[in-house]
Every structure is written in C-alpha cells, then in structure tokens.
Amino acid sequence: MNLQQLRCVTEIVAQGFNLTQAAQKLFTSQPSVSKIIIDFEAELGFELFIRHGKRLKGLSPEGLILLPHIQIVLHNMRSLRDVASECKNPQQGRLTIATTHTQARYALPAVIAQFRVAFPDVRLSLLQGAPAQIAQMVLGGVADIAVATESIAHTQGLSASPCYDWQHKILLPKNHPLASQSLTLEHLSAYPLITYEAAFAGRAKIDAAFKNAHLKADIVLEAIDADVIRTYVELGLGVGIMAGMALDALDPNGALLALDAGDLFGWNTTFAAIKTDRFVRDYERAFMALLSAPRASSGAQ
C-alpha cells in the first residue's frame, strides 16, 4: 500500500469516476491509473469500485468504508509536509487569500502592505468571488484564508474569527433632496436605489431593514463591485447603499456626498476563515491578526 494508490482512489472519486479526468489531474495516463487501482484491489483482497464493463460506476460497499480512512491518511500527510515546511522555513511560503472585490480593493491593501514588511519572503495571491464561492475555495484547498461577511462563519468545515465590524453609507449627489432631509428608511424608499447583489456586503441586512419597516425598496440596479455602484450613482441612476470603507476616501470637494447609515441597517462583521482541520502556519496567523487589528475605517464587505 502506498500514497500513489490512495491518491488515485480519491482523485477518481473527485472526478466522478472518470478515469481519463483523474489521470489528467494526476499527470499520468489512464492505463496507469487503471493498473494502480487493480494492483491496489489485489493487495486489499476486494474491489473498491463498482464496474460496468471497463467503466467505473461508483464505490463498492468496501470502498465506501475505506474512503474516509484514505482521506484521513492523505490529509495527515499534507499536514506533515506543512509542519515540516514550517520548521524548515517559517518565514517562507505562499499565502492565497479568497475574498470579495471590495475587500481586495479597500480593506486588504493596508493589511497586505504591513504583512509584506513582516514576511517579505511569503508570496501572496488574491482570488475573488462571492462569499459562497470563497468558502468553497478554502474548503477545496484552492485558497488558505477566506475573508468575507457573516455567511462564511456559518459554513461547515470552516473555522471563522471575527475581524472587524462595519456599517453602510448612503452615496448621493450633493444636490439630492435627501442631502437636506433626515435620513430614514421611508425617505430612502421614495427613490431608486443602487446597492450590492444579494450575496454581497451585508445586503441581507438592507433587505431585512426595509421588510421590518413594512417598506418596499426600489432597487433598480444590483452589482458586486462598489466602484460600479459609485459609477451609476454619478450617472444619476439612483441613490447608492454601500459598504462604508468604499467611501472613506470620497473627495469632499467632489459632486457626491456620503452619509452614515448605520442606524438604518445596523452593524455587519467581516470574518477570516480557515479550513477547520488544516495546519495553520505562523504567517497565516499573523495575517489574520493584522486583519483584526483596530482600525479607523468603517469596514467593507
């Protein structure tokens, strides 16, 4: 029994029992994968897969029992390599962060700048997506850390830590009627609104606030990108509801005005999440500590 055999089994399962795809992922040929599995089954004394001719259709009853143990062995081997790498080169490695556009654009630059000073030999990658996609990137081993709002904190298999709280702001032209009115949900509901798509930046809090007030929000445009929302507010399409950090650097001499909206939509929390059963390197902990450090900004998605 060897690790190559174990990797073949898990990759075949991961590829939906398609030997050709499994071979491509393992950088070998389909006949080689077939031979490895046949030899492994001969060594075990039973078949791991249900077959239909030369095609694999699923795991056998014995295969279903064995698979979790194979996965544990491979996971432990990966952890062992990570620990060995940490012992040998604690200041070197690669850190892949999965996050949203607004985090990457507004929240992370200062953190990454500090991190690079402390860990100049760690190479960084930023992957972007919706919170659900971000969580899957970490669960699948594509990324090391997920940074997003509360939704990732409820994802099974992830261990999430709160980093900072933030609130929304309202973006509108300085000559807009709301600029001289008290800011209420009732007043907002009278105008077309531009805000985030449902999965992003505390949108659930926005929807809940209008619903609880028995008001209908006229959301004429949804986007995943704070800069896109701002662009369409500038065009006069509507009033923007945005993450506060995206408006912290708004030019006070410009044509747009940012108003605090925390009392209307409440507080949101940004979390950093890692896979629960994975060894965490010191520089990963350092990154999350920097992300959680006190800041003067109002946060992002």
Image (cartoon, helix red, strand yellow):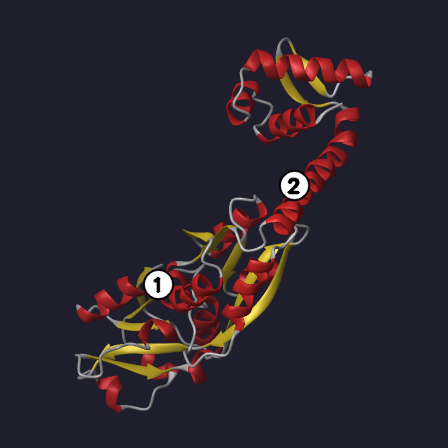
Spatial CA span between label 2 and label 1: 32 Å
Res 189 seen here: no
**Looking at the figure, which quarter contains the C terminus?**
bottom left
Q: Amino acid at mark 2?
A: Arg
Q: Amino acid at mark 1?
A: Arg
Q: Classify 66 as above or below 165.
A: above
Q: Which x, y percent locates residue 260?
A: 37, 83
Mark 2: which secondary structure?
helix
Q: Residue at x 32, y 69 (%)?
A: 218
**Among all residues in the image, which is located at the extreme right?**
45
**Looking at the figure, which quarter contains the N terminus?**
top right
Answer with left or right where residue 253 lies relative to residue 187: left
Out of 299 and 171, give the one closest to the viewer: 299
The circle drawn on residue 78 is 2
Answer whether labels 2 and 1 touch (C-beta < 8 Å): no
Q: Residue at x 58, y 50 (%)?
A: 89
For label 1, count other residues whose C-alpha is less than 10 Å away and answer few (under 14), some (14-19) or many (20+).
some
Answer with left or right where residue 202 lies relative to residue 31: left
Report which quarter residue 219 is drawn in. bottom left
Q: Residue at x 50, y 76 (%)?
A: 165
Q: Which x, y percent locates residue 298?
A: 42, 78
Q: Which residue is mark 1?
A: 105
Q: Which x, y percent locates residue 48?
A: 74, 21
Mark 1: which secondary structure?
helix
Q: Classify 184 as above or below 235.
A: below
If you read the primary sequence from the N terminus, does the residue marked by circle 2 or circle 1 appear first? Answer: 2
Answer with left or right where residue 175 lies relative to residue 135: left
